[in-house]
Amino acid sequence: MQKSKSIGNRIFDALNGLGLILLALTCLIPFINIISSSFVTIDEFTARNFILIPRTFSLDAYRFVLSTPTIFRATAVSIGVTVVGTLVSIILTSFMAYGLSRKYLAGRKLINFMVLFTMLFSGGMIPTFLVVSALGLRNSYWSMILPGAISAFNLIIMKNFFQGLPDSLEESAKIDGCNDFMIFLKIIVPLSMASFATISLFYAVSYWNSFMGALLYIDDHTMWPLQFVLRQLVIVASGIQGDLDVVDVVPPAQTLQMAVIVIATVPMLLLYPFVQRHFVKGSLMGSVKG
């Protein structure tokens, strides 16, 4: 028979639940305000400082965004860059993380130090631009993928996850005649799906939200990703001359900015439920061991 909770424990549980609810509302209410503000007219937007439920619905902002000739092409570019970039990043990161997780790797400590060093110091924007240009990657989709293909933070999480797997599994596989590649492919990968799902989500969000690569390396407007096109739309709606063909009727910049935030956020929100069950496990197991 379960022992009943004391009054102090009940009060603590109630206060804890109330605090969590308030914390959740501080994250949810601003997002609801953004969604609602994207559907209102400019008169209502200027008359009300905070909008949770629109009084008058208007689709002008979304009609403007979806009627631009380049929006669907830019969406296809972003999807392609996100999918290919995430695949490339997860392959390179997992290979390097598996190597660094093996204690018998020569120079392992030095390489780990070099990885950690890049988290604090980097070459900067200009040296990176010069390297990308020297490699002939400008005006190519690879310029939006390869410069950030491996994240030191994601690499460390995955390395620590691999280190947490029992060494006996690798020893047993070697006795059965498996080489390092077969051990990684047939044993490490199936046991690390939580880590793979978590890191893949991190990379996918990074590629989807990135526009600096296009700003620095892409001159051809047909290769612009969605985030960069949305940025140009906000510039046009703000009255600044933008390098983008748009419709004649431009909605207010305020509601357009809200619509842009919604359009840029929704795809990742739709993706999150599919990896949510792996998210916490992958993050915690990859961060508790050094």
Image: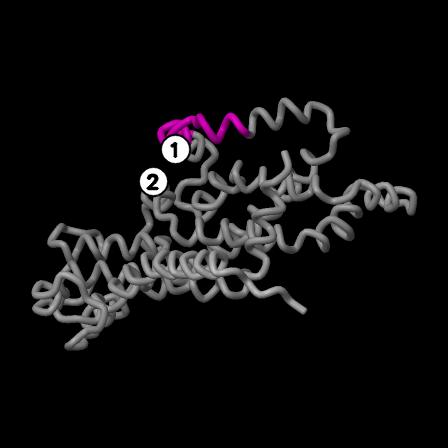
> Which x, y percent locates residue 161?
65, 44
In the rendered structure, the answer to whether residue 287 lies left or right of residue 12 reads: right
- Helix, strand or loop under label 1: helix
What's the residue at 45%, 56% (across, down)?
12
To which residue does mark 1 refer?
129
What's the residue at 73%, 34% (across, down)?
102
Looking at the rendered image, the quarter that the C terminus falls into is top right
Q: Which residues are magenta?
A: 116-130
| Of the pair 268 and 178, the residue shown nearer to us | 268
> Which x, y percent locates residue 97?
64, 39
To which residue does mark 2 refer?
216
Instruction: Decide whether the magenta segment is chiefly helix, strand or loop.
Output: helix
What's the residue at 27%, 66% (across, down)?
35
Specify the amino acid type for callout 2. Leu
Contact flag, marks 1 and 2 (Cβ < 8 Å)? yes
Q: Magenta span has 46?
A: no
Residue 176 visible in the shown view: yes
Q: How many marks?
A: 2
